[in-house]
Image (tube, helix red, strand yellow):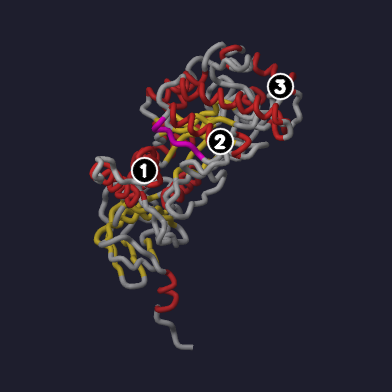
Amino acid sequence: MKPNHMSRRDYLKLLGAAAAVSSSAVSIDGEAPTSPATQQNADRLNRMRWWREAGFGMFIHWGLYSVLGRHEWVMENEGAPVAEYALLAKQFNPKPNAAREWAKLARRAGQKYMVMTTKHHEGFCMFDTRTTGFCATKQAAGRDLVKEYVDAARAEGLRVGFYYSLMDWRHPDGARCAEDEAARKRFVEYIHTHIRELMTNYGKIDVLWYDVAWPLDARGWESEKMNEMVFRLQPEIIVNNRNKLPGDFSTPEQRIQAEDGGRAWESCMTMNGSWGYHRSDDDWKTPKTIIRNLISCARDGGNYLLNIGPRPDGSIPGESVRILSAVGQWMDKNGQSIYTTDRCQPRHSDYASFTRKGNRLYAHVYFWPGSTVAIAGLRTRAKSATLLATGRNVEFTQDEFRLRLTGLPEKAPDDPVTTIAVECESEPRQDNIFVRKERKRAQV
């Protein structure tokens, strides 16, 4: 762990300190002597508290591309004419309140928030808007699909996020805005109006997830003005970094990549190779892979935003249900090793990965070795160990080179990953180079 990595626990301590300073530090004239930067940081810490604690969310890609079932980029990748593609809006008429099943599945899977596509690159608005007739309320569906989603998420106690694509393949100014100033102004007003409607018409929104800023930069999009409007309308919201401003968190896509300096980050991933519904994409990740990815995000202080691509009627593909149900069963028993965890320095093993909460180290064994699990280079003394799923005590021995957890079942006691909680005397630290250098060597 690098010295400048902020753990979730340290983050919460800083949050408390910032709140204390904000409430108690007073100058002669009665105003808190805090700089704008300090106040901005304290504001961000407060806004992001729930998100840091949540750890796991559901992404939903749903739109006209779902009707074709050949990937969410089908309009561009197959060169479909705009007029031809627009006919899909007359077929897109999902069953009422399909989002209720999404939200119930998210809750069962242990996910704490949802982010749905309100407009993808195709330009179709899933919400009611005064800007265009190319929206769900004025086409075959005849109703506001974003509202149904918001209501469903709230009914299950989940936080609500909106995805919104700045890029638009349908709008006549969507490409020429980069070359024509009049077109840019028209297009930016169109986009800003959508965001204003989304931030105004659905109550409290927790996340705004911009996507694809092509073909403009932050200045062209007037992104500072855009974000100022968003925060004026939704003071407690958090926003990502894809309108070419830093935002509140970074968004590595289809990879797990931690940010330095304690900056918040969220890895977004698909369960197969597609974001939108793709009827022929059978490259499904296993529940074990999903759980290992979730562990890796938690280990390095990040969130995991895992996608589903509903069918055009709103139903969820069976494989997505099966995978998320298995993940949820594991989270029911092991969720404490994921939620509100701290950045974890131990990470070296051939068959396990690690997370941490304070002085407790969670060893997640994904390739079960049998009756003994060994962790090399653990330089912190262990006090006790238990199987997290059952609470059974685990015997152990420890020297300066390894911790050996013994007397375990020959077969993994939990599926698909068995977690062992090791209570340590202080923050667990691992040093495998110490083992390599200092372990006694044989005579030649």
Q: Are marks 2 and 1 in contact (CB under 8 Å)?
A: no
**Residue 291 lies in quadrant:** top left
Q: Residues within 10 Å of mark 1 (few under 14, many from 20)?
A: some
Closer to us: 162 or 304? 162
| Residue found at the very far bottom of the displayed protein | 444
| Type of amino acid under label 1 | Gln
Residue bearing the label numbered 3: 85
x, y percent for residue 326 = 44, 38
Q: Check disc 1 and report the residue beneath it.
A: 39
Disc 1 from disc 3: Cα separation: 48 Å
**Residue 33: where, in percent of width, then height?**
30, 46
What is the quadrant of residue 433 in the picture? Answer: bottom left
126 displayed left or right of 434: right
Residue 374 left/right relative to 132: left
Q: Amino acid at mark 2?
A: Ser
Q: Give the residue at mark 2.
A: 223
Asked which secondary structure carries label 3, the reply is: helix
Which circle's residue, 2 or 1, is located before the other in the chain?
Answer: 1
Total number of numbered labels? 3
Residue at screen point 60% across, 12% down: 138
The answer to whether 417 is drawn above or below residue 102 in the figure is below
Q: Residue furthest front?
A: 29
Q: Residue at x 34, y 68 (%)?
A: 379
Q: Earlier in the sequence, mark 2 or mark 3?
A: 3
Q: Nearer the viewer, residue 217 or 312?
A: 217
Q: Is residue 295 magenta?
A: no
Q: Which mark is residue 119?
A: none
Q: Which residues are magenta?
A: 235-240
Q: Magenta region's main secondary structure?
A: loop
Side (left or right) of 114 relative to 423: right
Q: Identity of the amino acid at label 3?
A: Tyr
Q: Marks 2 and 3, Cα distance to the nearest angstrom?
A: 30 Å
